[in-house]
Image: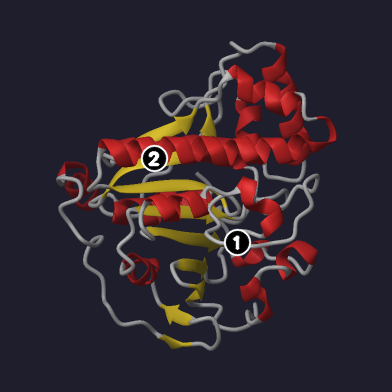
Amino acid sequence: MTNTVRPQQAPPFCAAMLAAWLAGPSCTPAEAPTGAQHHPPAATSSTAHQAAHQPKGSEPSPAPAPSHDAGRCGALGCRLFATAQQALQVVLESNPKVLAVGEAHAHKGTEQIESTARRFTDTFLPLLALRATALVVELPIADGHCGKVEQATRDVAQKVTREQAASNPNEYVSLAQQARTLGIVPYPLRLSCAQYRRIAEAGPQDIAAALAVIAQTMQTVVMKRLADNPTGLVLTYGGALHNDLQPDAGHAAWSFGPALKQSTSNATVELDLIVREYIRDNEVWQALAWTAVFDPGEHTESFVLYEPTPKSFVLIFPSSKPAVPQ
């Protein structure tokens, strides 16, 4: 998701990990913070059971889905689909070794709308479970062992996430938990004290330093997963900035996309998931190539899929209905 964000801005799609730092010192996939809710996947129980027991890497695609789409819709390879499953099937036709999923984070005032993370957890993850072996999620393990520099990093997170929905970190924990239920091993991020210190000592550039550390750490974890299982699909999930395959020159340090693209011999696929109600008419969003051709008043009942550049997809959800209280 190429953009022109300045380092000290807090765009809605760059800092899930920073948000997660606020969840508490022991935020792990096995033990959610107080108040975290787990939502069952949209797939049937039989589908989830099959996914959890299917040998990984044995299927070239997710669960069977109709191959036809609802039609073409204009520039940037725009296509319309009736279901998320149909759109995902098209994305997976690129045969990725790494599917790098990015989101626009939920922000304050949108709590009544089902978030991107919950949609991915409930709908996409069960469809990917037959094929994926690992999920590298932009969720840190923060246990306080680095002392003051770790606390300073949380102060950075507070600056970045002040406009984001308070539920964001909990939903990332739920995502990791559901992945494990489906047989996909979740891998959160563990930072070294040196990395915490790099952020804490960055001064006015602390947010930029944090974004660079996120990208570097996710890249390292993904490469290890690929080395351990060359035939399985590795998923990543986080902000739709770190997964850019072609980031702006000034933001190259914030993205693991180019390095993974090279190391996988062009088998890394970028997929940005966008809740259309999150889109704003401002500089950050206008810098994205697809916003010039996207009309929020059109195709409101369809999944809209763009491919601005090869193997770089943007999927925009239909108009949202209020989330059902849990």
> How far across and how far down the image is residue 17, in percent?
60, 37
Residue 93 position by quadrant:
bottom left
> Is residue 177 shown to the viewer in this render?
no
- The kind of secondary structure element at disc 2 is helix
Q: Which residue is mark 2?
A: 223
> How far across and how far down the image is residue 181, in percent?
30, 37
Of residues 296 and 193, which is closer to you in this image? 193
Position above or below: 148 against 274: above
Amino acid marked by disc 1: Met
CA gap, disc 1 and disc 2: 22 Å
Q: How is the image coloured?
A: secondary structure
Q: Residue at x 39, y 71 (%)?
A: 87
Left or right: residue 35 versus residue 81 is right
Which residue is most to the right? 204
> Is residue 22 shown to the viewer in this render?
yes
Q: Residue at x 18, y 57 (%)?
A: 59
Of residues 318 and 251, which is closer to you in this image? 251
Amino acid marked by disc 2: Met
Q: Residue at x 48, y 34 (%)?
A: 173
Q: Residues within 10 Å of mark 2 (few under 14, many from 20)?
A: some
Quarter the N terminus occupies: bottom right
Q: Residues within 10 Å of mark 1 (few under 14, many from 20)?
A: many
> How far across and how far down the image is residue 324, in percent?
52, 53
Q: Residue at x 75, y 47 (%)?
A: 10
Position above or below: 130 against 307: above
Position above or below: 31 against 246: above
Left or right: residue 248 versus residue 63 is right
In this rendering, which labeled residue sits more in front, label 1 or label 2? 2
> How far across and how far down the image is residue 199, in percent?
71, 28
Q: Which residue is mark 1?
A: 1
